[in-house]
Image (tube, rainbow, N blue to C red):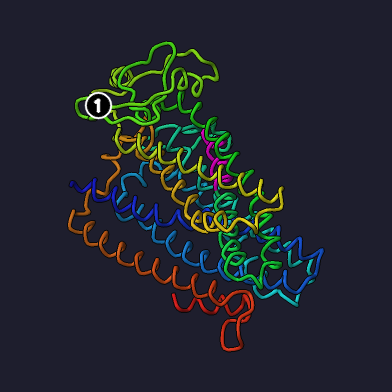
Amino acid sequence: MTGEGLARLQFGVMTVYHFIFVPITIGLAFLLAILETRYWKTRKPEDRKVIDFFGRLFLINFAVGVVTGIFQEFQFGMNWSDYSRFVGDVFGAPLAVEALAAFFLESTFIGVWVFGWDRLSPRMHAWSMWLVAIGTSLSAFWILTANSFMQEPVGYKIVNGHAEMTNFFALLGNPQLWVEFPHVEAAALTTGAFFIASISAYFLLFKKEYRDWFLPPFRIALVVAAVGSVLVVAIGHEQAQHLIAAQPMKMAASEALWHTSALHAAWSIISLFNPATHHTWFSISIPSMLSLLAYNRLTGRVQGIAEIQRLYTHLYGPGNYVPPVLVTYWSFRLMILLGTLMVVVAIWGLFLLYRKRLLERPRYLKIMIWSIGLPSLANIMGWIMTEVGRQPWIVFGLQKTAQAVSPTVSMADVAITLIGFALLYATLGVIEVRLLLKFIRIGPEPQDHEAVSTNAGLSSLGEL
């Protein structure tokens, strides 16, 4: 393990942990806005209690997400100072807009929403949550604008050895951004929908006195989950087709495609191979499927790793431009598997709702309860494939990861902070889970000695 390897491991651990909370926050904000818009129409007391219940869970998740996000940003100055110097003039602009506009928007109106019950009209209170939802999505948009530059640099020039922005609107029109942002947004809505559907399924199955309370949010969440999961698959297909042209090495590595395919390229469902010798022991493939995925037709060659390596050597000079194939291949497969399971679970639930047999199928409700983690695992696998598959580049075609590490930070420093952050995040994880379970156990009608409103839910975050 080198200093670069430790720095990458530390950033990877912190990013994966932080990204557990980001999609849940975005998705829950939109689902809460929908639920409160419904409450504005119904004015049923039980609907408000259910919104208040999910609001406590949202606030806990939001608080942990903010804390972990702040620690993540420290990485740029601690372990990646050469990266910050090289790309800061470009990377800093969208992050500044995210902090000054989007994050302030969502933070301000979260406060309005929390303390606005009985102070604002139901209409204005519902609008405050819609503004929170818009703010969370804008935050994701600006962060993905910065990330898209790393994937596909546009709107810049190199001046004195570092990148300077020449066209801000080119960043906003980055083709990578407009396949990446819709994919992440659809995944976030699916994540929030599965979160609400899974917890609602728990009450439908084990707390039958709350069936009438949690059936409406379950229905809404299930519809969003079904639509969102199908959109994730469809937009992910568009994103993969874009990568065929923009980052062909990433796509070749995700298929463990060592040499350019035949005219009818097969897609491997599963393949056991040695990445060092390129020897494949076992493979199950679908003929012509890779051509279909790449070009929407049954014919079309897909470039292989060896040919792209020779091309990149010609373009960028001597070096190894092959990412870790094993990680890229399996993270892509796991993402596809988890995404398929989400589509099946969501559409199965819609079918049961349509046939009015949902409450007669306790097995399905149990499956839905355990499905709460499917979107988060799929999100993690997707980001691992996206970031690991870009290696050895930190900014594609401009700066390698090895050139981005802070030169004055020792391996010992990185190792110590890695252990420290890992322990801190593990502690936050335990507290988060305990708080969520506590409020789920309390339910939507807490006793007098327990939390009685979203305000109390916010106060309980002092336990963090």
Q: Residue at x 60, y 55 (%)?
A: 361
Q: Is residue 27 above or below residue 311?
A: below
Residue 161 visible here? no
Identify residue type, mark 1. Trp
Q: Is residue 98 above or below residue 255?
A: below
Q: Residues within 10 Å of mark 1 (few under 14, many from 20)?
A: few
Instruction: State which quadrant residue 168 falls in.
Output: top right
Span colored in magenta:
176-187
Name the dominant secondary structure of the magenta segment.
Answer: helix
Q: Which residue is mark 1?
A: 281
Instruction: Tell me where residue 139 appears, x and y as whole percent.
Output: 56, 52
Element type at marker 1?
Answer: strand
Instruction: Tell me where residue 227 appears, x and y as whole percent.
Output: 64, 43
Q: Residue at x 61, y 88 (%)?
A: 448
Relative to 159, is 324 on the left or the right?
Answer: left
Q: Residue at x 44, y 32 (%)?
A: 157
Relative to 372, is 200 on the left or the right?
Answer: right
Instruction: State which quadrant residue 433 falls in.
Output: bottom left
Relative to 288, is 140 on the left or the right?
Answer: right
Residue 102 visible here? yes
Q: Nearer the viewer, residue 146 or 429?
A: 429
Identity of the residue furthest to the front in this view: 360
